[in-house]
Image: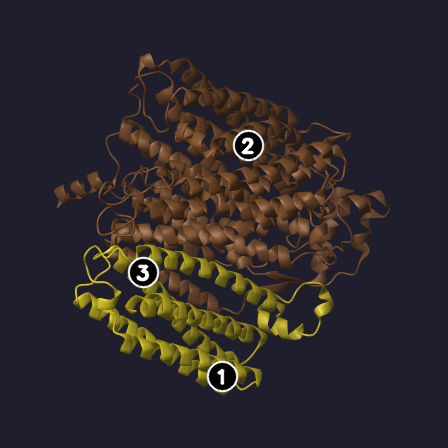
Amino acid sequence: MWEKIKEFASEFFVTGDPLIYGADVTIVLTLIAIVSGLTYFKKWKWLWREWLTTVDHKKIGIMYILAAFLMLFRGGVDALLMRAQLAMPELNFLPPDHYNQIFTTHGVIMILFMAMPFMFGLFNIMVPLQLGARDVAYPFLNSLSFWLFFSGAMLFNLSFVIGGSPDAGWLAYPPYSGTMYNPGVGQDFYIWGIQISGLGSLMTGINFLVTILKMRAPGMKLMKMPMFSWSVLSSCIAIIFSFPILTATLALLFLDRYAGAHFFTLDGGGNPMMYINLIWMWGHPEVYIIVLPAFGIFSEIVSTFSKKKLFGYKSMVWAMMIISVLSFLVWAHHFFTMGSGADVNAFFALTTMLIAIPTGVKVFNWLFTMFRGRITFETPMLWTIGFIPCFIVGGLTGVLLSVAPADFQFHNSYFLVAHFHQVIIGGVVFGYFAGLYYWWPKMFGFTLNERIGKWAFWFWNIGFYCCFMPQYVLGLMGMTRRVVTYSWDKGWWELNLVSTIGAVLMAIAFLFQVWQIVDGFKHQAKNRDTTGDPWNGRTLEWSIPSPAPVYNFAVLPNVSRQDEWWEQKQSAGAHQTIKQKLEPIHMPKNSGVPIVMSAFWFIAGFGFIFDWTGFIYTGLAGVVGCLLYHSFNYDTDYYIPVDEIERTEAAIRKVNI
Amino acid sequence: MAESQTSEQILQAHAHDEHHGHPDMEEVRTFGFWIYLMTDVIIFGTLFATYIVLQQNTDGGPGPADLFQMGGIITSTFILLASSYTCGLALLSMHKHNVKGLISWLAVTAGLGAIFIGMEIAEFNHLVHEGATIGTSAFLSAFFTLVGTHGLHVLFGLVWMIALIIQLAKRGITPVTKRKVNVISLFWHFLDVVWIFVFTVVYLMGVS
């Protein structure tokens, strides 16, 4: 019996690597600390009522961003491990199989479990406030989306200590990701982690599309909507059209692995190329999904900190919509080298180059917005200004890559690695940081220390260029991506060492950011945002107190123009809204169903991964049970009475005066 | 007391005041369901594309013409079409505020759906006994996945419809239950449309 348990444990848990034993110990200690802390301070009930079951979009947004930061840490550690391995030639710090796992999890985590939740967090917190709405269209679904993302992310991360991590790259190309070459459970963790959180992403896409189309404040025509909300709309359209492809594709890969199907296998008539087409039909729109909201954030910030109306509003809207559509017509540029023929390659090369046009339009719009503006350089604006040159270089190397014949040289080299990191860090990550700094006072009701923020900004920027500029050169020198090591005679080591130093600088920058946030919470009393409008903003989110009350707007605002709040401030009597007649506010009730249902998804996913039928049935039965329970529950809303609104408003506005 | 008021009572109390400025939530929910259906179209689109690409890859095993028995397929097609018709009748009853008619037609719809599912299971069983399983060839992998996904959708709709019948019996026709019936009828007609494509692309074009 004992022997059997030992044998099981040695296969079930990942063994043999001191790094992983260290992680095991840390995880157990952290869990013990959290559980005992919550118990000691009697916070379980508070946690359940205020956070775990909440349907308030602002709280869900904060949870998303918290999770994104944790994942940024994990993905960042992966990155540092890789850079440590590559710092010098012929290092043996990470064995090849472990290295494969690390670059796989780094990619998956950064895109799907860092960028996506960070983006959804910002959607959640800001879209309803910008639109003058009291919540998203489907608050319950919103909570479910978050918990599905969370259980997917946890499932994926579990592979680090249980069963073994996936190692077939961030898009898991077959046949290598099939059972023939990858018999372990790593790829199944990949499939189910992404599948479960992908369902959540799809729901969020639908939720915010409907929120934007149906929940805008009276008078806010689409063409008067803030630019961030426009970017969310274009991103959601891409989510709605692309994520179902991911769901279907991963399901097919799973059937190959689980049921012995032959979609993408080498035998039985399977076609691995089919997978690569399908996954990029999702994968390419996906990168636009994450970058479009960043464009929206920059547009808001550049206009606020230049004290000017955004230049070329209409062209900005059109540019985003065109990018959203074009993003579906470029997928094959990821595999020019796979021999689709000159005509196909020419088509995809052209569509790829076309995307540079609307993107260029946007860059000029931002520059012209700044032109003759009264620019101030607070941290959100710094990130915006840092973004523009970085994204231009990243975009231009993208155009180089789009030239199909030349791509035969660049393909899968470090030139490519440098390119996509430059657009994703320089565009997406800088954008979300800018958004986080910009909206932080609205989220938490206090401002952050600008000095530490500037240190973080400069470390990030210098670290970024230091890390990735050498990689362009390395790519041209012939270094291919995903190599675990290289020999001394290649002449690559100096540039690799510089690149590693850059990575360390970015890690220090991250520490500055954590310090900035901790410092912010410590000194929040003296940094209260009492005006609700610390940056002299332009859009509706700045017209209400920070942090916003649970119902957001005591009286729904009436909108008649772009930058409504700014225009109101220009004419006198800005604060007259309070005088208007209050009415009871219709609000959704908290629900425990989303977190419970997601836990059942987790169980079902775990069962599918290890092929434990008991888990599969329990999980799926639980999911159906939760759906039915929710369907039969008609007690989902309540009204906030007028006197309670009056009391809340009096309390928060009193602090304001 | 105010707290125990259910959303439905509130909805009825506020059924007439649309000047609040907040949109009609039941309409918003129906709209969202349309969007969900669009995403489902894309899932089926992906599976159809996969089927069409892999159709010829029988790996020396049986092809469509060897396997499909059109008699049963045509019968089940007509059963599903009929269920769409009875679903329409259920909606007509709902618009006449006839709860009994609504529930009975929904029950007939669910019954026809159950027969359809039963026939599909029988067909799959037959194929497996013939030795044509999901692992036989790429063609059969794509076939079982596409047709099976449609079947799973019907099964899901079936459970949902039964749950809805119970709710209707308990609560009658209210704005909320009305929206729920509207939504499931959308779903049901959608599955019918998908089946028309399955029938054409997989079966008719397969045996011709």
Q: Which residue lies furthest to the front in this view?
A: A343
Residue A27: x and y in percent read 36, 36
Q: In which quarter of the image is the C terminus of chain A?
A: top right
Viewed as shown, does residue A34 lie left or right of B11?
left
How far apart marks 3 and 2 lie (CA) works out to 40 Å
**Which residue in the structure is indicated by mark 2?**
A395
Q: What element carries label 2?
A: helix
Viewer-nearest residue: A336 or A259: A336
Residue A473: x and y in percent read 45, 20
**Nearer the observer, disc 3 or disc 2?**
2
Q: What residue type is labelled 3?
A: Thr
**Which residue in the structure is indicated by mark 1?**
B89
Q: Which mark is residue B145?
A: 3
How far apart marks 1 and 2 lie (CA) works out to 57 Å
Q: What element carries label 1?
A: helix
Q: Which chain carries label 2?
A: A
Q: The yellow chain is which one?
A: B
Tell whether label 2 touches label 1 (CB within 8 Å): no
